[in-house]
Image: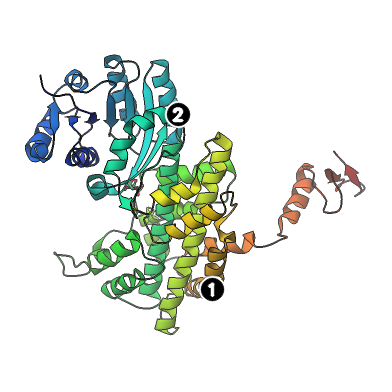
């Protein structure tokens, strides 16, 4: 009888296939399965000699191929397909077996599935995996959530296949229940903000600085050697440098300007609204994608709605440097907001998230990997209960140094009619956050006027209402 496999992977589309290959290349015997049998056969034909694989044609065969207690990674499309696989697997499994959902599932689904599995004596883990196809194969960032004892049993495999930075694997137990998928969701939200900021910088460099895509590609290449050094800045340089084989034009110039999305950014924004956390950068990034999708409406509006036509006006070199600084400052704000959101979620759910550890495991393997995460890790090492990253001396200073440039970029873009929702909302958040006294006093006054919603006073405790429509006197309401 063939040796049993240490772990199983069901779902052999590219992410599942590459995770399985990553495990096998590191010596772990892996059983593989796919609902469509031909996919498993293809996998075994293409990669079977890369490591100790067992190809299984049926789910029963797959389950029988595994050591007990079994560990099964499910890598299928988020949503109902995950439930369908769990429903099919559960009757074939034994108490204590572990099901790992490594897809981009929504964290409340993960909580629900964990409870469902628990009722059946099974253990369930929701594991965020970031890094795309290449990361899955060569070393992703892994955000495991769920039962800590189950994690202890799979830790050896997960840390072995994860990316490594400074001898530290980009994988750590995040927290119970849906915490792993929650952190992956916020990772993706930050990814949306990062990408939107890059797109706004590209728009300004194209339409205000008047540069071509390859010229801008070189600027990004240059930016990737400084504070902005990150995977996304690096690949922006490469995407902008690419020539279209068909037309000879820069490829980016022939790509349709409609951004798609699978939902993780939207979930992050909705969750921020539910938690009451200001998450302007990520949320604007989601709205910018939805606005981009209104292509026909935009086409009609482009010849109807008035506004300036962008064109060069300022010194190009100064503008390029200003945009770099605005990008960095806005990025700091996006991360400050994302981390504040994770902090609020951790408090609300009793997850006890170690935010410094989250920054640590995002330094390699994942899409938002960046030098700058070292700074965030250091910030939480020094101040574990930090309210906002902007208040740490390094970031306070970085934004202070960049703010003049940031304001010039927002002013120039606004004057020239270039939409910069992420740059400008990040700056407004910054200006709102640093105000001891904002204008919400008037909001409270208005709410009290039309709805008797009451207000608090700066000079005494309790709540008050003014009889606006009667004699104008103030009454104490509590
Ligand atoms: C990752 C990516 C990955 C995926 C995004 C794309 O961390 O590896 O985030 O999860 O590429 O979900 O998301 P959109 O299709 O919504 O842009």
Depicted 89 relative to depicted 146: above or below? above
Residue 215 percent location from the top left of the image: 29, 76
**Residue hosting label 2:** 111
Report whether 187 appears left or right of 411. Answer: left
Tell me which label, 2 or 1, sits earlier in the chain.
Answer: 2
Depicted 247 relative to depicted 65: above or below? below
Q: Quadrant of the N terminus?
A: top left
Residue 366 percent location from the top left of the image: 34, 51
**Residue hosting label 1:** 401
Label 2 to label 1: alpha-carbon separation: 43 Å
Residue 464 percent location from the top left of the image: 84, 44
Depicted 329 relative to depicted 170: above or below? below
Q: Residues within 10 Å of mark 2 (few under 14, many from 20)?
A: some
Residue 323 falls in image quadrant: bottom left
Q: Residue at x 58, y 52 (%)?
A: 386
Depicted 278 relative to depicted 91: above or below? below
Q: Residue at x 19, y 68 (%)?
A: 243
Q: Is residue 54 visible?
A: yes
Q: Residue at x 23, y 40 (%)?
A: 19
Residue 175 percent location from the top left of the image: 46, 36
């Amino acid at each position: 009888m063939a040796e049993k496999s240490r772990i199983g992977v069901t779902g052999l589309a590219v992410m599942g296939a590459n995770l399985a290959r990553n495990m096998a290349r590191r010596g772990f015997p892996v059983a593989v399965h796919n609902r469509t049998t031909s996919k498993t056969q293809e996998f075994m034909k293409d990669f079977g000699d890369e490591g100790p694989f067992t190809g299984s044609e049926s789910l029963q065969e797959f389950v029988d191929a595994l050591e007990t207690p079994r560990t099964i990674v499910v890598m299928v499309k988020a949503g109902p397909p995950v439930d369908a696989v769990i429903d099919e697997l559960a009757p074939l499994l034994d108490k204590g077996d572990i099901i790992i959902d490594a897809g981009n599932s929504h964290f409340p689904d993960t909580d629900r599935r964990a409870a469902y599995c628990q009722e059946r004596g099974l253990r369930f883990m929701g594991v965020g995996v970031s890094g795309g196809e290449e990361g899955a194969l060569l070393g992703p960032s892994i955000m495991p959530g769920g039962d800590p004892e189950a994690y202890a049993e799979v830790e050896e495999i997960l840390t072995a296949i994860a990316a490594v930075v400074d001898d530290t694997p980009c994988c750590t137990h995040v927290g119970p229940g849906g915490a792993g998928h929650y952190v992956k969701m916020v990772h993706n939200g930050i990814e949306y903000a990062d990408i939107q900021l890059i797109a706004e910088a590209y728009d300004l460099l194209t339409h205000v600085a008047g540069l071509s895509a390859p010229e801008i590609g070189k600027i990004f290449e240059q930016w990737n050697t400084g504070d902005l050094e990150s995977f996304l800045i690096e690949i922006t340089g490469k995407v902008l440098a690419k020539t279209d084989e068909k037309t000879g034009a820069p490829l980016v110039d022939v790509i349709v300007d409609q951004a798609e999305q699978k939902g993780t950014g939207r979930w992050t924004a909705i969750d921020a609204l539910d938690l009451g956390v200001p998450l302007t950068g990520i949320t604007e990034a989601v709205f910018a994608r939805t606005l981009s999708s209104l292509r026909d409406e935009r086409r009609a509006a482009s010849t109807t709605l008035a506004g300036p036509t962008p064109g060069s006006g300022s010194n190009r070199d100064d503008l390029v440097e200003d945009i770099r600084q605005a990008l960095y400052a806005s990025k700091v704000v996006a991360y400050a907001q994302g981390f504040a959101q994770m902090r609020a979620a951790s408090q609300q759910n009793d997850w006890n998230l170690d935010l410094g550890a989250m920054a640590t495991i995002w330094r390699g393997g994942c899409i938002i990997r960046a030098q700058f995460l070292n700074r965030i890790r250091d910030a939480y090492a020094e101040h574990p209960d930090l309210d906002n990253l902007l208040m740490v001396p390094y970031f306070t200073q970085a934004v202070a140094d960049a703010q003049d440039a940031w304001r010039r970029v927002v002013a120039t873009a606004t004057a020239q009619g270039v939409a910069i929702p992420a740059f400008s909302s990040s700056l407004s958040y910054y200006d709102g956050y640093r105000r001891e006294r904002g204008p919400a006093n008037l909001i409270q006054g208005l709410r009290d006027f039309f709805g008797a919603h009451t207000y608090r006073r700066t000079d005494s405790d309790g709540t008050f209402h003014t009889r606006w429509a009667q004699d104008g006197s103030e009454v104490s309401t509590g």
